Image (cartoon, helix red, strand yellow):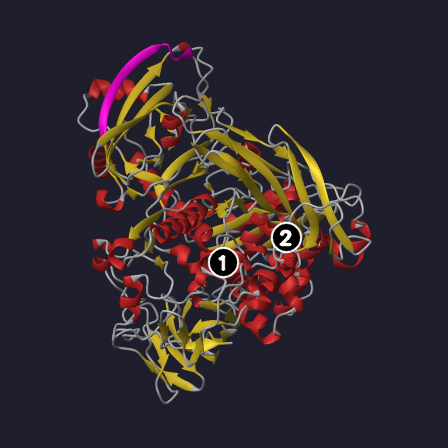
């Protein structure tokens, strides 16, 4: 071994910290110079209200098998502290310090699990907070002793809370390996949370450079459930790499124990992205998507292939550097065949074929990445195109590939399909933003897969066979998944919250809701009341920051779902999501409906947070069967309705109306409607709405704020907008106007991760700007951390390019037309630069047509009429404000100060949004 990791760790803490506050700084030790400048001392004491003495000091703890903790603080009276604050007081922070001895100059692969950040000497790295075990950092170290430090936060949502007998149980682990091309990687390390198959390679370098092959299920006698796959590539070379091509070798086996080699097929795969977009800088990891088919093979080979009981897939990736080309091979991806017809039993004595109504399928997600979901087929296949689809949302931390209890928890329906999306990762984004889009794309993906596998007519079947290449099915009756715009939102825990979220923000796609143990919103689940920032921040600024996340306050948006049948359930002894949350939902819904008995709770006595029949008993199934038979337009007969939004970018159509623009963005806004069914008149009253579109209404006369419009063609997307005189008009010209914002270009910053393309991170070219090599090292490292976080927490893809890269100029964002209906959306990008280091950023902001009132000089930044020229906290802390997880209170622009490290939000000098004309407003 070329290194030695200490087994004694120095710990300092605990100190208070709020849920999701750590990325804003908020470290009390910064008042004393910061942890990394403090030396271990048994005598040193620091104030902390968590300890009964009011002070805490240094302790040491032993690690075992590279696991540190659980940490114990015997002088903290957690139960007493929780009397006033509940389990949110258990959200503490502490620092831990160890050493890493390097015996010779070495490259290592390292990751810390269950922490958000760690430091090797002075350099910050992103940790693996949720313990996904999917990423490692490549670090080059000189011979000698190095310091390894981490800021440990007891995240109540991750580690749990309320265990007052033992106190919070918090620990972290270290994965570390030499990168020398000879050491084997522990097979348990890469138990990838998302992949569908096992992988194995021979050496550490090979294992790390190609891994985690994603392929769909193989349905025996039917075909692959999708024609998309992906493979993760980690660039562990000194140069940038470009993926040139991918080839696949399929080996199909059949018979008892898969001993018969049926057929071998070599096929080129097609890259999803253009090859010149698939570049990996040194140290970067990306998931490369591809499509595949088995065309041009003999009918005999296809027939044998479809009868296989196991498919072995070899993935061959060709790459090129500026000076070389080489190939990576993953040779051990095996897919066990799944019996499509679950009513048949095996008669050939082969017990290895998985017979199940559940299978995995792959599809292209909203950003062009290849993702997967699971589907449970109904007992009866039919061609009913009006039947609903059940969209089942899992709880936090549930891996739907490994955790079969989730797909087993909902009973197969007679003729209705059930879709189990991943949300892109086990924790996802609380079914907001990217996770929400992933859920809806999973529905469309299943339709496309089934259209390939099965036909609605002989003609379509023949075309499908020609296109797909390996479909050999008998002529069948009509086939349909159903109507993916008639959904039953269903979920448990975080998925229960997700069901409430989708119902309140996309109610027109729903016919019913089944929500079990769902919380109201993240700041109510683990209260934000204990944020350090509250002791320092101007309340007006905090309100501005809270506006960045108000769109996810489900309780605020409950009026949107009035009229939807709701089944709300919890276990009476739930100690994970308190039943109070569900009861609050029901109270508010009944208040909005003016009917105290309309929605009732299903409280199951003696049950906790989860039990096997939570979504599968007589009461649930009775509700589902009733919902499945509901008419197509269950809310059309309502006389009165309300629409509420704070951000139409995250709110779909409600009662056939899509809000397109707010008079003042990010304020509570909406419409109230009254319907005269006999005369076909819709009366609307608006609040802070400046544009909306009719997508589906039956009325021909609409009165808006007492202004009548007759003979409205409600099915043609009629757009109403306020003119300069504050009068409503029907828009007949292209809208929005140049330089005008709408929901298509609204933020806040977290919408950066909803791009239809990979995230583009633009860093300065040091040679062009004559910057020192250390500057490039800094920018390169920060870009790697940003890309790492999107890859880890959101299953996303990133491109890292220099500011003179041709794609930056070719794809340059036009802020004037951004948000209009363009043929192709631009890349969303992050520019890294201090002052005018980044040429592409300064060029963009300097355009005469640029309406955004931000100016960046060498030593100052101006937002609107305000100029900020004091010393900041540096680029590193600004990068940490990118909302890599949910619950981050980050609007559209933020200016920090050195006090942010200590006071969190209290150190923010200014923050806010951009109006409809791109002019800044805020604090």
Magenta stretch, main secondary structure, is strand
Residue 214 to residue 160: above or below? above
Horizontal and vertical percent position of residue 273: 26, 44
Q: Is residue 219 left or right of residue 357?
A: left
* Distance of label 2 from label 1 (alpha carbons): 42 Å
Residue 720 to residue 117: above or below? below
Horizontal and vertical percent position of residue 571: 71, 46
For the point 61% across and 74% down, the residue is 538
Q: Is residue 492 visible?
A: yes
Q: Is residue 606 left or right of residue 713?
A: right
For the point 35% across and 14% down, the residue is 254
Query: 103 or 73, which lies in front?
Result: 103
The part of the chain drawn in magenta is: 257-268
Magenta-drawn stretch contains 261 = yes
Say the numbered circle drawn on residue 568: 2
Which residue position is annotated with label 1? 877
How packed mark 1 is, by other alpha carbons closer than 10 Å (few <14, some 14-19, many 20 or more), is some
Instruction: Give the mark, 2 or 1, whose residue is nearer the N terminus.
Output: 2
Q: Is residue 21 left or right of residue 53?
A: left
For the point 28% across and 41% down, the residue is 240
Query: 361 or 211, which lies in front?
Result: 211
């Amino acid at each position: 071994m070329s290194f030695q990791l200490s087994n004694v760790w120095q710990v300092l803490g605990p100190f208070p910290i709020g849920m999701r506050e750590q990325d804003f700084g908020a470290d009390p030790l910064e008042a004393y110079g910061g942890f990394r400048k403090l030396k271990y001392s048994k005598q040193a004491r620091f104030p902390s209200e968590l300890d009964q003495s009011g002070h805490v000091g240094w302790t040491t703890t032993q690690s075992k098998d590279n696991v540190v903790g659980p940490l114990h603080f015997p002088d903290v009276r957690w139960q007493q502290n929780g009397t006033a604050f509940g389990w949110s007081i258990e959200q503490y922070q502490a620092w831990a310090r160890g050493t890493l001895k390097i015996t010779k100059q070495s490259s290592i692969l390292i990751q810390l699990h269950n922490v958000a950040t760690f430091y090797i000497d002075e350099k910050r790295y992103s940790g693996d907070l949720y313990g996904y075990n999917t990423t490692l950092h490549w670090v080059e170290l000189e011979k000698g002793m190095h310091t390894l430090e981490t800021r440990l936060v007891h995240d109540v949502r991750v580690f749990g809370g309320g265990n007052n007998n033992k106190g919070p149980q918090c620990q972290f682990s270290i994965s570390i390996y030499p990168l020398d091309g000879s050491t084997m990687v522990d097979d348990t390390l890469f138990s990838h949370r998302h992949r569908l198959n096992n992988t194995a390679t021979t050496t550490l370098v090979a294992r790390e450079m190609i891994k985690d092959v994603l392929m769909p299920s193989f349905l025996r006698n039917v075909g692959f459930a999708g024609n998309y796959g992906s493979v993760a590539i980690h660039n562990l070379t000194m140069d940038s790499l470009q993926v040139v091509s991918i080839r696949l070798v399929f080996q199909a086996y059949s018979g008892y124990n898969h001993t018969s080699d049926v057929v071998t097929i070599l096929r080129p795969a097609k890259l999803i992205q253009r090859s010149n977009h698939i570049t990996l800088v040194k140290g970067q990891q990306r998931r490369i998507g591809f499509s595949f088919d088995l065309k041009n093979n003999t009918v005999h080979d296809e027939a044998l292939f479809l009868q296989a009981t196991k498919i072995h897939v070899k993935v061959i990736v060709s790459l090129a550097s500026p000076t070389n080309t080489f190939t990576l091979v993953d040779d051990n991806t095996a897919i066990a065949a799944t019996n499509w017809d679950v009513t048949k039993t095996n008669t050939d004595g082969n017990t290895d074929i998985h017979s199940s109504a559940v299978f995995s399928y792959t599809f292209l997600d909203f950003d062009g990445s290849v993702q997967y979901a699971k589907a449970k087929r109904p007992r009866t296949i039919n061609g009913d195109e009006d039947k609903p689809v059940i969209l089942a949302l899992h709880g936090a931390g549930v891996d739907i590939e490994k955790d079969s209890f989730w797909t087993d928890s909902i009973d197969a329906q007679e003729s209705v399909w059930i879709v189990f999306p991943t949300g892109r990762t086990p924790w996802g984004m609380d079914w907001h933003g990217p996770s929400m889009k992933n859920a809806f794309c999973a529905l469309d993906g299943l339709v496309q897969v089934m259209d390939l596998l099965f036909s609605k007519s002989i003609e379509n079947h023949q075309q499908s066979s020609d296109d797909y290449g390996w479909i050999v099915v008998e002529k069948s009756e009509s086939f349909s998944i159903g109507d993916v715009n008639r959904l039953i939102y269903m979920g448990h825990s975080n998925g229960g919250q997700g069901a409430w979220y989708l119902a309140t923000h996309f109610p027109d796609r729903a016919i019913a809701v089944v929500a079990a143990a769902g919380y109201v919103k993240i700041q109510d689940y683990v209260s934000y009341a204990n944020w350090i920032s509250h002791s320092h921040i101007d309340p007006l600024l905090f309100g501005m920051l809270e506006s960045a996340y108000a769109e996810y306050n489900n309780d605020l948006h409950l009026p949107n779902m009035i009229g939807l049948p709701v089944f709300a359930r919890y276990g009476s002894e739930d100690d994970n999501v308190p039943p109070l949350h569900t009861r609050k939902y029901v109270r508010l819904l009944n208040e909005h409906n003016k009917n105290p008995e309309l929605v009732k709770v299903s409280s199951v006595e003696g049950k906790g947070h989860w039990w096997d029949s939570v979504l599968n008993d007589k009461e649930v199934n009775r509700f589902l069967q009733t919902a499945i038979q509901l008419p197509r337009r269950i809310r059309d007969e309502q006389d009165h309705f309300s629409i509420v939004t704070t951000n139409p970018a995250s709110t779909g159509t409600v009662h056939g109306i899509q809000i397109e623009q707010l008079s003042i963005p990010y304020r509570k806004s909406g419409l109230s409607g009254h319907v005269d069914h006999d005369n076909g008149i819709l009366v609307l009253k608006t609040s802070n709405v400046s544009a909306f579109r009719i997508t589906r209404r039956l009325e021909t006369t609409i009165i808006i704020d007492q202004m009548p419009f007759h003979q409205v063609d409600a099915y043609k997307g009629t757009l109403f907008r306020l003119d300069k005189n504050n009068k409503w008009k029907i828009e007949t010209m292209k809208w929005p106007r140049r330089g005008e914002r709408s929901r298509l270009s609204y933020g806040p910053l977290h919408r950066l991760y909803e791009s239809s393309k990979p995230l583009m991170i633009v860093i300065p070219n040091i040679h062009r700007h004559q910057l020192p090599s250390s500057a490039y090292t800094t920018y390169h490292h920060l870009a790697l951390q940003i890309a790492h976080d999107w890859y880890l927490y959101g299953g996303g893809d990133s491109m890292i390019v220099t500011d003179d890269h041709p794609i930056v100029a070719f794809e340059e964002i036009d802020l004037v037309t951004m948000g209009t209906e363009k043929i192709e959306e631009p890349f969303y990008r992050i520019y890294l630069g201090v002052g005018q280091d980044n040429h592409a950023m300064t060029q963009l902001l300097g355009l005469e047509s640029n309406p955004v009132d931000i100016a960046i000089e060498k030593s100052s930044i101006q937002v609107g009429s305000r100029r900020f020229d004091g010393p900041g906290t540096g680029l590193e802390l600004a990068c940490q404000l990118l909302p890599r997880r949910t619950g981050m209170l980050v609007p559209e622009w933020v200016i920090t100060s050195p006090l942010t490290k200590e006071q969190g939000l209290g150190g923010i000098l200014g923050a806010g949004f951009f109006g409809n004309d791109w002019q800044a407003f805020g604090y």
